Image (tube, grey):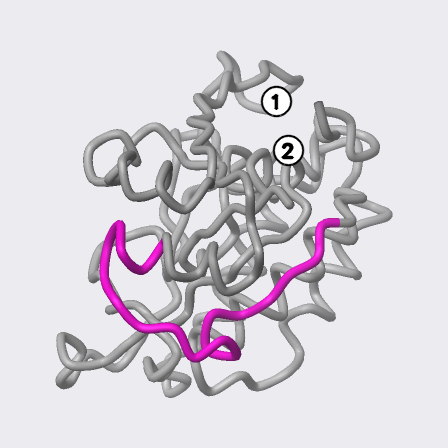
Amino acid sequence: MIVCIHQPAYLPWLGYFDRVAASDLFIFLDTVQFERNSFTNRNRIKTANGPIWLTVPVRLKNHLEKSVIEIEIDNSQSWKKKHLRSIEQNYRKAPGFAGKFERLRLLYTPDDTRLAELCYRQLLFWLSELKIATRVVRSSELGVTGSKSDLVLSLCKEVGANVYISGPFGRDYLVKRRFGEAKIEIRYRDFVHPVYPQLFGDFVPAMAVVDYWMNCAGPGIFGKE
């Protein structure tokens, strides 16, 4: 079984989905520490004035002692309206806007109180929209502990993986010897970003998934090798 693992991410970029699409099972890593100023609760969209951040506000009190699954959204701020307004204003001329914006708007209707719940629910939406059929399991459902390479290896063992797909930064911390002893192959995946039609001038890579989704028809780039 081919497995990949990644922390929750809000409106992930295409590289996130590339690894998921190449796997049989995706482990949604909601049991690790929340990283401030990371892509867990924010991402960028393209505008006429360049990329801007869309950030889900969270309550940061004692966040260094909490895992992602415990992080609360600060719903006292009208962030959902602001995000939808920004997307509407900047993608209303995109080819896919008319048929997609209402589906996106409904995605923001539930009042999620925790960041992991928001990211998980939206992840399932994006996987459906991109026609990625990879099975998803949450690390919080597996009861596996550890950190860094040991955590990844333990999760792979728990689900019976024989191949682990890692991003390029895995080369910096994964202990290959221990994966070899467990008979689990590590495959590093260096994502080559596609160039697709985009609004507002020259192409800018690594935008939130909504940029690709609005500008292109169909799932297009995803599929197993």
Horizontal and vertical percent position of residue 57: 33, 72
- The residue indicated by pointer 1 is 198
Q: Mark 1 and mark 2: span between their CA atoms?
A: 8 Å
Q: Secondary structure at mark 1?
A: loop
- Which residues make up the magenta segment? 134-152
Within 10 Å of disc 2 (Cα), the crowding (few <14, some 14-19, many 20+) is many
- Using the image, determine if residue 199 lies above or below residue 112: above
Camera-nearest residue between 130 and 165: 165
Tell me, yes or no, whether the two marked residues, 1 and 2, touch with CB atoms within 8 Å.
no
Which residue occupies the extreme front position in the image? Answer: 181
Within 10 Å of disc 1 (Cα), the crowding (few <14, some 14-19, many 20+) is some
Quadrant occupied by the N terminus? top right
Depicted 113 relative to depicted 46: above or below? below
At 32% from the left and 80% from the top, the residue drawn is 71
Against 106, residue 205 (above or below) is above
Which callout, 1 or 2, points at the residue further toward the start of the chain? 1
Residue 133 position, x and y percent, is 78, 49
> Residue 123's quadrant in the figure?
bottom right
Query: To which quarter of the image does residue 73 belong?
Result: bottom left
Q: Could you tell me residue 78's position as x and y percent?
A: 44, 77
Residue 163 lies left or right of residue 168; in this view the side is: right
Instruction: Give the amino acid at mark 2.
Output: Tyr
- Name the element at disc 2: helix
As for residue 220 lying within the magenta part, the answer is no
Say whether residue 86 is left or right of residue 127: left
Which numbered marker is on residue 144? none
Residue on which disc 2 sits: 212
> Depth-wise, is mark 1 or mark 2 nearer the camera?
2
In the rendered image, which quarter contains the C terminus?
Answer: top right
